[in-house]
Each structure stands twice: as structure tokens, then as C-alpha cells.
Amino acid sequence: MSTPGIPHRPEGTQDLLPDQLAAWSGLESAARQVFHRYGYQEVRPPLFENTALFHKSTGEATDIVEKEMFTVPPRGEGESYTFRPEFTPGVIRLLIENQLLKQKGFWKVWYWGPAFRYERPQKGRYRQFHQFGVEAVGSHDPLLDVETIVVFAEILKGVGVTDYAIRINSMGDAKCRGAYRDALKAFIEPNLASYCENCRRRFERNVFRVLDCKVPADRARNERAPAMIDHLCVECGDHFSAVQRGLKEAGLAFDVDKRIVRGLDYYTRTVYEFSSARLGAQDALGGGGRYDTLVGQMGGPDAGAVGFSAGCERVILAMEAAGVKPSAAATADFFAVAADDAARPEVFRAAQAFRAAGLSGDLDYEGRSVKAQMRSANRSGARYAVLIGAEERAQGRVRLKKMDGGEESVVPLDEAVRILKGANP
């Protein structure tokens, strides 16, 4: 509960404090290493886009567009803008608008940053959350689908999350979806009145979204619904078989889940999800799939594409559940201590000399006693305390005290720099 008169953060957001950020830094570092290893380049689209972009790409009948977007209404004749609820439309827009696909026909890019959805906050689910992911654009090769799944698995491995499940499915394409749409409508229509209001609305607009319903009674009904993979055309069936072979060859365990449809309209063929039972009912880590028509639909060339997005908060919860201990902050090299007020300028100068030499450390800015400063040196984990008082000033030297053994020496400043650099592991 917030204290009256004190500013508080908006509902559904979080403050990331220094002791929490070790896990975040570890995740970002692991992701960057894997992306580099697999040849993905970083892109950074803006935080907000024209609202029409998400209506056109994400889909009018999706939960995101219908009720979850943070939209700024237009001023006068201006545009309406929406803070991104997901990255894929903005990344594809970036590739098209900057004519990258004219420079070369195939791109592998990755992203990291905040996204925004107006939904009910709960554990691991926020209104401002963070995602990382990839988009591989310019190929229909099923092995590229496999690679994106492997990349996600490698990142999880890199942060110590090994207890996860991979589920895959195929959404087919325009050739085979028509027959499946008819079969699904024929199954649902006799009991349509029993479905929730969202499902009844989606039945005409996008019947596939009915399968994505989270209402328990509707989920139970949908267990008996026909499956898309039983209606795949030859080309989509071959593609899905190739993905499964590739995952087996990569040594990744997976299950085919006929009920995965993903919640966004642009998916075609492969769809997949990563989940962790350690997270309870909200078990999703992330997911993705192929979207071969989206680039062309947005005004670009006819280009196959596949990618995934993962929730940073969800992965960090999985790290905690797995008992992963984030690496502590790097050990400081020094803490500079002033024995009296007159020594403070010299202490500051010494600290700057150490830092200029690439060493890390701090000093007191509160005018505290030597005893209090030494306590700070201990808490900082510094390897050396650097003390300057009247005696050291008179000699033009500094006193080095090794924190783990108490050994002391009085040396010129340049010699102190060499000692600390030589002791720097």
C-alpha cells in the first residue's frame, strides 16, 4: 500500500533495484552471446508506433488490439500512436522502411527492451514488461525454424534454466486453412451459444482464435476439436516434418501439441511455445513461429520469416525457481579513505588516478570518520583501502592496506597504481 503524499509507481510496473539487476544483466549477457554466436544483429525500433501498424499486423480480433494496447489519441489531424505491445510489427516495419531487404534478401536480427499491455497485473505479468527475441527474414527453410528454437534453448541453458518444455504445432497456410476453417466452424457452431462472449465474437472474425481461449469450459470443449495438423496440405506437412527432424538432430526434446495456435493473426506453418512447470499456472517463457505473409502484407517483398519473443520477467522467475544465483557485482579494487578533511582533495585525486588506470573503486562523500569509511571499504568488497592523512600528504605518498590480510605499505601514487593493477585478477 502506498503512503499518502509520496509518489508511487503506476500499477502493473516495477522498479528494478540494484540487487535485482544482477539477474537481468546475466540474462542479457547470455542472450547477447548466443545471438552473436548464431549471427543475429541487434536492432532497436522506437517504443511507440503508428496505431494502424498493430491493427494491420497483429490482428483486429486479437486480445492485444481489442483491449490491451496503450494508445495515445491523435491531436487534431495528427496520428494515433501506440506503445508497442510486441516487437515483431515494429521490427518488420524497420526492415522495410529502411530498405534493408533491398540491400540483401536475408536478415537475422534480435531485440531487447520494454513492451506495454493494459492487462491485469499478476506474478510475472506486468503492464510494462520486457522482451527479447529474434526475427529471421527472407527464407522459407524449415531449418531456420529449428534454429530459432535452438537459439532460445541455448539462452535458457546459458542462464541455468534446464527444466522447460517445448511444444510445437503447424498452422498451415492459405492453401490448407480453408478446409480446416470449415471443419472447425462445423465443430463449434452447434454449441456456440455455450462458449464465452469473446469466443462467440471471434467465431465469425477469426475462428482459430477460439482455440486460444483460456476459459476452462471452452478449453475442455476444444479438446475434441479437429486439429490443423490433420488438415495440412502436402507442402505444409513436409515443412512440419522437416522441423521435427531438425529438432531431433539438434538434440532437443519436444511435443507436438495440436492445440497451440498462438494469439496473433500473422502466424503460418510452424508455431511453438516454451514453458516451465516451475512457474505454476502462468507457465509461459516465450514462443514464436513462422509468419510468411506478414512482410508482404506490410508492403515489403514476398519474404518468408520466423522468430520468437521471450518474456524477461518470466525467464528470471524460472532462474529463481531453478535456484540460479546471479553473479555478484565485480569486486572493487580500492576504497579511498581520508583521515581528515584536509586530505579529501588528495583522496579524490588519487581515486581519479586509479580509475584512469582502469581500476574500480569509490570514496566517501559524507564527511564521515575513518572508522566509518573503513566499514564502507569492507562492505564494498574492495581489495585495498587507500588511506591519506597528514603524514602521507607530507610525504607525497598514499598508504595501501590489503583488506584480506591487513598488510600495509606507504608508496608514491604511481607505485600504488602499479601494485593495484598487478594484483588485479
Image: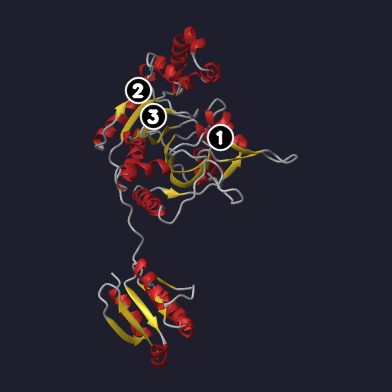
For residue 400, side relative to residue 52 (left or right): left
Q: Secondary structure at mark 2?
A: helix
For residue 207, side relative to residue 394 (left or right): right
Is there CB contact under 8 Å for labels 2 and 3? Answer: no
How far apart are the alpha carbons under marks 2 and 3? Answer: 10 Å
Query: Quick one: label 1, few (<14), some, or many (20+) residues within 10 Å?
Result: some
Residue with the mark numbered 3: 270
Compare residues 205 and 367 and report the one nearer the observer: 367
Residue with the mark numbered 1: 298
Could you tell me the amino acid type at mark 3?
Thr
Q: Quadrant of residue 378?
A: bottom left
Q: Secondary structure at mark 1?
A: loop
N-terminal of the pair, mark 2 or mark 3, is 2
Residue 56 in view (yes/no): no
Q: Residue furthest front?
A: 4
How far apart are the alpha carbons under marks 1 and 2? Answer: 27 Å
Is there CB contact under 8 Å for labels 3 and 1? Answer: no
Compare residues 213 and 231 and report the one nearer the observer: 213
Question: Percent x, y for residue 47?
Answer: 56, 46
* Residue sitting at x 35%, y 47%: 38
Compare residues 245 and 188 and report the one nearer the observer: 188
- Which is more foreground, mark 2 or mark 3? 3
Could you tell me the amino acid type at mark 1?
Met
Give me the disc on residue 192: none
Residue 248 in view (yes/no): yes
